[in-house]
Structure formats: structure tokens, C-alpha cells
Image (spheres, rainbow, N blue to C red):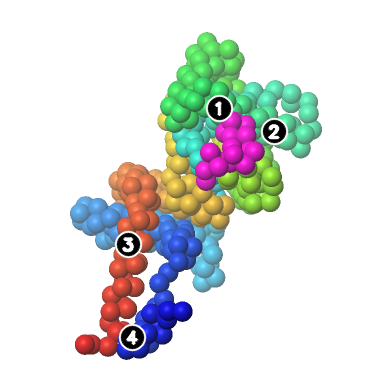
Amino acid sequence: MSETPAEQPGAAPPPPDSEPPETFAARLSARYRIGGIVAPLITTVVAFLAGGIVVGATGHNPLSTYRAIFNGTGLNWLFPWVSGADRVDAAINLQQTLIQTTPLILTGLAVAFAFRCGMFNIGGQGQYLVGAYVAIFVGSSWAHLAGPAHVFLAVALAALAGAVWGGIAGFLKATTGAHEVISTIMLNWVAIWVGDYFFGLSGPFQGPDQFNPISNTVADSAKLPVFWGDPELQGLHVGIFIALGALVVFWVILNRTTIGYEVRAVGFNPSAAEYGGISVKKNYFRAMAISGMFAGCAGAMDILGWEFNLSTPAIHASSIGFIGVAVALLGRNTAIGTFLGALLFGALYVGTSTRQLDATVFDPQLASNLTLIIQGLVVLFVGADLLIIGIWQWRKRVRLRTRQPAG
């Protein structure tokens, strides 16, 4: 029997400090850890550094500006040394941040769930809008219902409307092969112009007492209760708990149910899933419907939580469904990542607003553009996991060479 190379006479032993070659599974695991944790962090840091350069170019101090934005978000309320009037202001600002975070969590989940099935849901905006339309119709009607029943019915039907709107794109992909990016973009515009017709001047759902293109106002019985802050000043409503519950539902569906197993199997490899007896077409429809459900619920949160009506200019100006794409990308399509991404973008939106940002530190009008710059950079860099992994592996090789003895 021949000897192995390690047993041959004169064979040089391996360096004592060398690392064994990585297996494919180990490399895959390392890539997941690096891309799933480090990449979003580095993406965010680089985006803020680039934003700081822009701030510096305008003649302002980036550190002072970011400190003012942070204080405007209300997140300084979490610090125990903030007290007195500053703590009261911080509480009000934090309430606004969490109000903005609520729908972003849901629209982020709408994108993330479709991603896990191998689809790119660009239709969160349209699904959000149809959910808002239904919430307005139900919330401004049937005022004879008791408060909890009215709220539940408005939220449930809004989520159902979003599921139907998202399911259309899933059905088209399953039956005709139509790409979901194209169909969802088209459905976005359909939703926008349907709302423009519904609530426009002389539209069928324009408020009868309104002289502007605006809808009826939601009845008090359908408004989400405020549990923190002054209801007259848009205190934080219970929708935040609905959004947090949706994160749990998202995780449970994907990781603890047969539906989630099939959705993830189709996302990994549709051909292998089909070979294994999983209906790819059914899961395309099902994943898009569930995604639309999350986005439709987001529309209900805004309408029933603090907007209470909807105007046609607001329909055209809304972009929360598109921000959900950035939230999902930054969060790596995970529940905890989506929450953190939604909190980041919600905080940026509030912290740079004209009401929260100290104008003596930085012009809020410019700061709103700074928010858009940071959002764009996050989307631009969020796919840089391959670059980060390459840098990580290069660092390991350099470290290995430095540990090996010279000669």
C-alpha cells in the first residue's frame, strides 16, 4: 500500500500556525455571517460618512449636524441623563420616529417576504395605497360599529386588499411568466391613478364637505388608540405593536410552517423545488399575496393612526412603499434586520424634518435632501457584500503571511 504524502520520508510538515483549508460549507457560512451582519453595518457607516462630506462641503460641522439630527429623532430619550424639558421634547420626537417606523416595518416585510421566494416586489407602494383606500372607506363608514370591531375590520380589509393587489402580480407570474418587477410597477401606477379618480374633485369618494381633492375623514371609532403622548399631537398609536407582531408573524411563517419551507425552497431553487413536489406557481402567488398583505396593513396604520384622510397630492407624493425596498435590502430580508432598517429610515425622516431639526445647526430644507442622499447610498452600497467578503479574505491572507516564519 502506498504511503500518503504526509507519511512520505522527507516531506515537510505543515507550518504549525497555518490554518486548514476551508470547506465549501465553511466558506458559505462565513459569507453568510459577513454579508448578513457586517455588510449592512459598513454600508450604513459609509453612507453616513459620505453624507458628512456633503455636510462639510456646505460649510457646516458634520458632527454637530448629526448630533442635532439624532436629538431630533428622540432617540436621546433612551439616555437616562436627559431630563427636564429636554426629556419631554425627546419623548415627543421619539413618538414621531416610531410612528414613521411602523409602516416602514410593514412595507419592508412586503419586499422581504417576496425576496425569500426569489421575487422582487417593487409593488409595495401600490399595495400600500389600496390598503389605505380601503381603510379610508371602511373607517369613514359603518361608524355604528364599536371601536375595537371597527378598527379590526378596517385593518383586516385593508390587509386583504393589499393581498389581492399583490396576488395579481403573483398570479400573472405563475400563469403567464410575466416578470413581477414589470407587473408590480404597472400596478403601482394603476393604484395611484385609481386613487386620483376616487378622491379627486367630483370623484365618487371625495369628501362631500370638502372643496379640495380629499377623502372623507375616518370616524373616531376607527382610529387607532394612542397609548403614549397626546392624541391631539399625533401621539404614538398601537399600530407599532401591530407592526412588531407582523415581524413575529413573518419569522414564524418562514421558519416554522410548511408554507415558509416551500417559499424558501422555491427561492433557493425553483427547479429543485418543483422536482421535490412543491408547486412553484402556487408559491409565487402565495408569496406575493402575503407580501401585499403586509403592505396593505401599512396603509391602514397610517390612515387609522394619524392621517385620518387622504388627498390626491398626498397619493402622488407618497413613497413609503419604495423606501420599504431599501429597508428590506438593508435588513437582509430578515425580521430583526427589517426592524432596524425601518427604525433607521424612520429616524432619518423625523430627525431631518423642519419641526425637529434645530435650524441654527443645519438648514432643515437641506437636511431633507441629506436624508435622500443617505437612502440612495444605502441602496447603492447594500449589495457590496462580495466586496466586503473579498476584503475580509484578503485580511485573513495578510494575517496568515505575517504569522508564518520568514524563509
Mark toward the start of the polypeptide (4 vs 2): 4
Query: Is label 1 in contact with label 2 (beta carbons under 8 Å)?
Result: no
Measured Cα–Cα span from mark 4 to mark 2: 72 Å
Residue 156, numbered label: 2
Q: Earlier in the sequence, mark 4 or mark 3?
A: 4
How far apart are the two marked residues, 4 and 3, measured between alpha carbons?
Answer: 32 Å
Disc assigned to residue 11:
4
Q: Crowding at label 1, few (<14), some or many (≥20) Cα neighbours within 10 Å?
A: some
Q: Is residue 370 left or right of residue 302?
A: left
* 1 or 4: tag closer to the N-terminus: 4
Give how far apart the Cα atoms at labels 1 and 4 are: 60 Å
Q: Nearer the viewer, mark 1 or mark 2?
A: 1
Instruction: Identify the element where label 2 is drawn.
Output: helix
Where 345 sits versus 36, above or below?
Answer: above
202, 399: nearer the viewer: 399
Picture residue at 69% right of the left edge, 45% below the top = 258
Q: Identify the residue under disc 1.
A: 174
Foreground of the two, 125 or 15: 15
Residue placed under numbered mark 3 in the picture: 390
User: Which residues are the magenta region?
Assistant: 266-290
